[in-house]
Image (cartoon, rainbow, N blue to C red):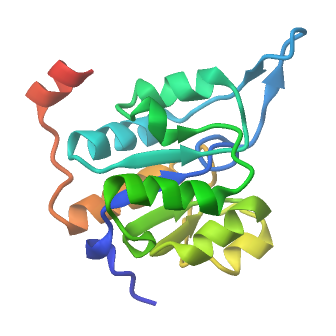
Amino acid sequence: MQLDLKKIKAFAFDVDGVMTDGGVLSDLSGELYRVFDSKDGFAIRMATMAGYPVAAITGGRSMSVRNRFISCGMKAEDVYLGSRNKELDMHDFCARYGITPDELMYFGDDVPDIGVLKACGIGVCPSDAVEDVKSVADYVSPLPGGRGCIRDMFEKTMKAQGRWVFDVQLYTKKF
């Protein structure tokens, strides 16, 4: 199947299992810790610098997740923590930016992501997603969660649109 990458105007993703390998460490106070791939983070920076709206829609509630994505250029209001209805949050995100779900690329890896993967324009999952997700995704990345899945399709999409351009002056000013 040929993907129409040129129709994409925004990106959204789940966190655990997509931006991370799914592993979560917990300290004695209950604070959760995740490891993020720096290349995935840089792809988010490139997208935000190019003007794409980018959202994280996660069931997790850790403020460290919000802070990580703000450091990548995302807006705080585009980090949906504690999401229990990802489709509802996806529609809110699309409405705030005046885009349709068909113009959104969404990344998910597990059962709570299936509705959004079906509703968006292009649904993407990492290579280690659960089988139910792989069966509905439009694209299964050759890369696992937390190891470049986000970078893989952000870069392909932005290159297809001629927008994968590193502007050192903007990068210096924004980051």
Image location (x, y in percent) of residue 140:
58, 71
Image location (x, y in percent) of residue 88:
61, 59
| In the image, residue 175 above or below residue 48 | above
Left or right: residue 121 versus residue 16 is left
Left or right: residue 164 versus residue 149 is left
User: Taking the image as drawn, is residue 24 in sight?
Assistant: yes
Quarter residue 3 falls in: bottom left
Quarter residue 56 falls in: top right
Task: Work out which residue is located at the far left of the displayed protein and give it.
Answer: 169
Q: Which residue is at 51% across, 61% downward? A: 91
User: Taking the image as drawn, is residue 126 in sight?
Assistant: no
Task: Work out which residue is located at the far bottom of the displayed protein and give it.
Answer: 1
| In the image, residue 28 above or below residue 148 | above
Q: Which residue is at 64% across, 29% downward? A: 35
Identify the image quadrant of the C terminus. Answer: top left
Task: Work out which residue is located at the far right of the displayed protein and give it.
Answer: 28
Image location (x, y in percent) of residue 124:
54, 67
Q: Nearer the viewer, residue 100 or 112?
A: 100
Image location (x, y in percent) of residue 49:
23, 39
Q: Nearer the viewer, residue 62 or 34?
A: 62
* Number of numbered tags placed on the structure image: 0
